[in-house]
Each structure stands twice: as structure tokens, then as C-alpha cells.
Amino acid sequence: MHAAQKPERLVLGLLSGTSVDAAEAALCRIRGAGDSVKLTLVGHHSVPISRELRRSVREAARPEELCGLQIALAECFAQAGLGLLAKLNIPDDSLDLVGSHGQTVAHLPPPAPFPSSLQLGEANVLSQRLGAPVVFDFRAADLAVGGQGAPLVPYFDWAILRGAGETRAFQNLGGIGNVSVVGDRLEDVLAFDTGPGNMLLDALAERVTEGALPCDRDGQLSQRGSADPVVLESLLETPYLKRPPPKSTGRELFGPTLLERVWAALSSRPYDALATAVAFTVEATARAYESYIYPRVRPAAMYVSGGGSRHPGLMAGLRRRLAPLAVHPLDVLGFPEAAKEAACFALLANECIMGVPQNVPSATGARAAVVLGKIVP
Ligand SMILES: Nc1ncnc2c1ncn2[C@@H]1O[C@H](COP(=O)(O)OP(=O)(O)O)[C@@H](O)[C@H]1O
Ligand SMILES: [Mg+2]
């Protein structure tokens, strides 16, 4: 039976975020679509991306390299999916549908001269390995109607995590930071990339430990230093942070350029450099709330997901800086934070085959609501 005709679908969501740290898989049972959609998480699984592959993704420049990565990354996503099914003892041929975000290698939203966003991970490889139709390339349709092509998670936050009669702020801290502020109505969702997340912190940790640590695990490096106020203020001058939403960003703004700036100023005090990066993420996030959210709505609480929610310094900093706003890890709502973004792409795939638009024009700035995704049947 065609997946769209079934009352309930077993849908696999796949993704690797801007950090290029791991391929994430989430398996979901999904009923219905649109307003009344119901999603239950069956399980999730994460497969680390090797240092070599991560470096290729970050440094790929020649067309030949991108061409090969299209397949290498798809094999990695397929492994994450198959690994999850094996872990759950679910036969390989049980999937009804796959939604694959892929790995972003470039994100050039408006006002770029040719607004575009490129995700790699060949959908035909995935459909062959996973034995189910694959929905992919979720950003192109929104870009085609003038949107940023991002953020896409607000649809999930609204459809699955909204609380009746209450406004919730869902803050993700991945390579970059993003927020969705969600109440009862989809049209009122406010969402944008807040700016830095872990990207600068990861790059500094790698440099300071000469590659031994890919991130400031549990805050162990940054907690030995203190933020440098002068460097912090200069980072906060980044023009992106002063632009009102809709807006989205990626490695282009918060990656290597900032690393070299911070390192030029603080290489003699490496732990202070890391502490400055923590303070930058906390302060940029807090100012985003004060400038662009509070004038419109006061959320009842903030729910944090993404790898940054496991960083004690970031969580403590947000709590201190945004008090009296309650800052919780997302898990308090009963949804594991580590599964959220992969589960989002299972949901977006479900809506695609059901013909339900899943971009959120109030978040992306698009001129119209459109159905996102292409299908390999
Ligand atoms: N225990 C931890 N302590 C500190 N940082 C962590 C921890 N676990 C994960 N992270 C951070 O989270 C990042 C990955 O988060 P993730 O949400 O997957 O981001 P992305 O969506 O960009 O891939 C890692 O690169 C790392 O910086
Ligand atoms: Mg990740």
C-alpha cells in the first residue's frame, strides 16, 4: 500500500547539523497530517562522523570533492538508519518513508544575489539502502518563494511540542543557535537563527587541544578561564546579530573567520578564549530575546535542545542572563533533545507526501506557504 494511504506510517528522519559531528537518525510513528498530526518517537541513534569526513565537508572546494561527498555522506546516513533499526530489532524492510535533510555544505539565503542552500547525501543511495521512498532537499522550495530556506524546525515545534494556551521558546544550540517561539497558531510562530551556538567553541577546543578534543566537552576547558570583555564586545558587533528577523546563518559567518579573530587576540590565554566563546553564545542569545522576542511576546519558558544543552557553562549562563525566564532542557517535556532535529525531518517528509505545506512563512520570510521536499519514489 502506498505510504500516504496508510492510517499510520513508520518514518525515519535523518540529519547531520552544521557541527558535522554525527549522522542522527530518529524513527517515528506518524498518524495523520497537518493540524491533527500525531508523532511518537520509537527510538533514535547517532553515528559519529569521522574526523577525515568532517574535514572534507568543511574544506571541500573542488566540484570533484563535492561529488564524492554526495555519496560518502549518504552511506553515513544509511548506516545511522540501519543501525537504528538493528538496535530496535525492527526488520530492514519495515520503513514506509524516509525524510533526509542531508549535510549542509553551503547556505546562502537572501540577501545573497542567488539565494541558495546546498545539502549533500544522495537520496537514491538512501532509498536503495533503506528500501523506502525518500523525501529530501527541504530548503529549495522556500528559497524559491523568497524565504531564507531556514529555519525548518519551527513547524515541528508547533505541530508536536506546542503547549495549549501557553507560549514556549524552543532554543536549539547546535553549531549555530536557533529559536522558535510557539503559541497556539502556526501563523504567529516567530523563529530565526539567534547566531552563535557551539561552532566557535568547537573550533577553539580543537585548536587548544591540538585535535585531541572536538568540543569543549562538559565545559572542561572554558571553566578554567574567564571571558575577555573587550574581545566579547567586538564579537557582539557582528552585524548579523543586529539585523531583525527573518534571518538565518551558518558556518559562513560564525565559523573560521571568528576563530582566527579570537585566536589572534587570545592565543596566549587559551582558556580565556574558550570562556569568551561561551559568553558570546550566551550574550548573543540573550540579546536576541531582548531585541526581537520580548517586544512581541513573553514566553512562559525556554526549552533547550542540541549539543549545547549538554554544556554546563552555556546552560548556567543562559539561566543567569535570562532570569526570571525558566530555562529547561527539552527533555522535561518528555521528548529527548538529541532526537528532535532528526524527528523533525521524519515529520516534514510525512507532510510532504500528504501535500501539507511545512515552511513557516512568518519564520522564513517566504511569500507563500509551500510544500517542502523532493521525492525519490
Ligand atoms: N557533553 C557536551 N559538552 C559540551 N558540548 C557538547 C557536549 N555534547 C555535545 N556538545 C556540543 O554539541 C555539538 C553538536 O550539537 P548538535 O546539536 O548535534 O549540533 P549540530 O546540529 O550543529 O550538529 C558538538 O559539536 C559540541 O560542540
Ligand atoms: Mg550534530
Image (cartoon, grey):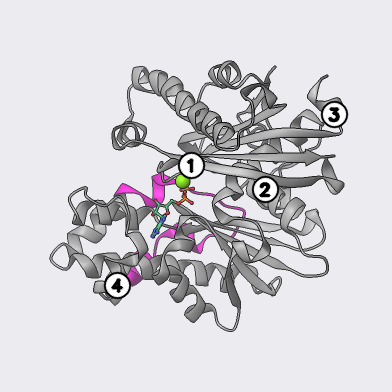
Q: Nearer the viewer, residue 155 or 131?
A: 131
Distance in Å between CA atoms under marks 4 and 3:
52 Å
User: Measured from the top left, where is residue 302 in percent x and y?
Assistant: 61, 69
Q: Which mark is residue 46?
A: 1
**Residue at image mark 4:** 223
User: Disc 1 on helix, strand or loop?
Assistant: strand
Residue ID for mark 2: 365
Crowding at mark 3 (Cα within 10 Å: few <14, some 14-19, many 20+): few
Residue depicted at 33% across the width and 35% down the height: 50
Crowding at dot 1, Cα within 10 Å, few <14 / some 14-19 / many 20+, comes out as many
**Does mark 1 have its CB less than 8 Å from ligand 2?**
yes
- The residue range painted magenta reads 232-256
Determine the residue positioned at 66% across, 32% down. 144
The 10 Å Cα crowd at callout 2, few under 14, some 14 to 19, many 20 or more, is many
Q: Nearer the viewer, mark 4 or mark 3?
A: 3
Q: What is the number of the mark on residue 361? A: none
Q: Is residue 205 left or right of residue 48?
A: left
Q: Amino acid at mark 2?
A: Gly
The reply to whether callout 3 and callout 1 are in contact (CB within 8 Å) is: no
Marks 3 and 1, how far apart at CA: 28 Å
Amino acid bearing label 3? Lys
As measured in the structure, the alpha-carbon distance from the residue carrying label 1 to the one carrying label 4 is 27 Å
Q: Nearer the viewer, mark 3 or mark 2?
A: 3
Between tags 4 and 2, which lies in front? 4
Can you see residue 147?
Answer: no
Q: Earlier in the sequence, mark 1 or mark 4?
A: 1
Q: Is residue 266 magenta?
A: no
